[in-house]
Amino acid sequence: MKILFSNNIEYMFKQYYRPLCLYATHFLSDIDTAEDIVMDCFVKYTEHLNKGENIKTPKSYLYQMVRNSCIDQLRNPNFTENAETVPDYPDDEETCFDQYEREARLWSEIDKLPPTCRTVFLMSKRDGIKYESIAESLNISVKTVEAHISKAYTVLRGKVKVIYSSILLMFA
Amino acid sequence: MKKINDEEFNFVVEHYKENRIDTDSAWKKFKQKNNIKSSRSNWKSLSIAASVLFMTSITIACIVTGYNPFKSVIRQPNNSDKPLVDTIPDKVVNDSVKVFKFNDEPVGKVLKELSSYYGKTLSTSDSTKVLSGEIEATSCEDMVSIIETTLDIKIKVE
């Protein structure tokens, strides 16, 4: 019985940890706080299960827990992050959850990119650094930077199966 | 899989940090915090498997060498063993001579003790008399006759 239970929590954790973190990040704009909150929620969730509480929809339950914790966090005056307002809990849960699962998958695809490729991609897209500056700081040619970025897009596009024509056009 | 839109893509890229939201390391941390039993029960089953294997190998070794490990554990009937209950002689002079000590004990009780020691049923009509002292005897009959003469009673042996 115990084994079944812990397998269940392991499954839940591995399945939903990342989407939940991204969900919290939408509210808090801070990855570290989001991770702490999701971890705390899982700890509480386990306690509830240990008490013998019957949770019929664990996924929604976890999302709700994370959402409530985020609201608490935003009310905390010590929390100074540039936070966005928390939207109402969605009526159509599944569509909403799908979004965070897609984002989680994209996150792990970025994780899997080759290190240099990822660095160049993030410098350009996330930090908004120009190709020339990236080439200079990494001591590579602008052509190489372009190659890395197009490779990153190809990989990510291939994995998430979507055409980022508009984004690619921005770099063209 | 449903398509990811530009908004979602941009959101992830903007917030992406290396080595964050790592499910595996987070799970390890979570397990430590919660003492999740899965690993422990694995250890348990592992140790059970190990002990079963250990016992099996010992059994096989015993069969092969013809050694019985329980031989030494099972107590051989030995008269020099320390008395477990009062029904065992207090002193053994040699194999046949045993000494029973009694201290103000009613005959009924004495006979009960001797009965269970010799495996016979000893009974008497007058069990009110009290016996004190050491009785040295070689056999049940010897013991019975000593008590009979000392206390002047009749003892029936069955």
Image (cartoon, rainbow, N blue to C red):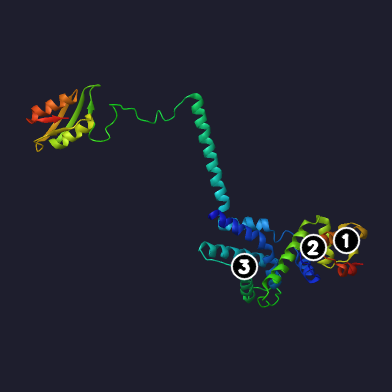
Residue type, label 2? Val
How busy is the neighbourhood of tag 2: few (under 14 within 10 Å), some, or many (20 plus)?
Answer: many
Q: Earlier in the sequence, mark 1 or mark 2?
A: 1
In which quadrant of the rendered view does residue A128 lie?
bottom right
Question: How much space separates mark 3 and mark 2, taking CA atoms?
Answer: 25 Å
Mark 1 residue element? helix
Which chain does tag 1 point to?
Answer: A
Question: How much space separates mark 1 and mark 3, taking CA atoms?
Answer: 37 Å
Residue indicated by mark 3: A62
A7 with respect to A148 (left or right): left
Residue type, label 1? Ser
Mark 3 residue element? helix
Check if mark 1 and mark 2 are on a common chain. yes
Residue type, label 3? Leu
Residue indicated by mark 2: A160
| Mark number displayed over residue A39 | none
Check if mark 1 and mark 3 are on a common chain. yes
Say which of A116 and A88 sits in front.
A88
As drawn, B49 above or below B142: below
**Labels 1, 3: front one:** 3
Residue indicated by mark 1: A150
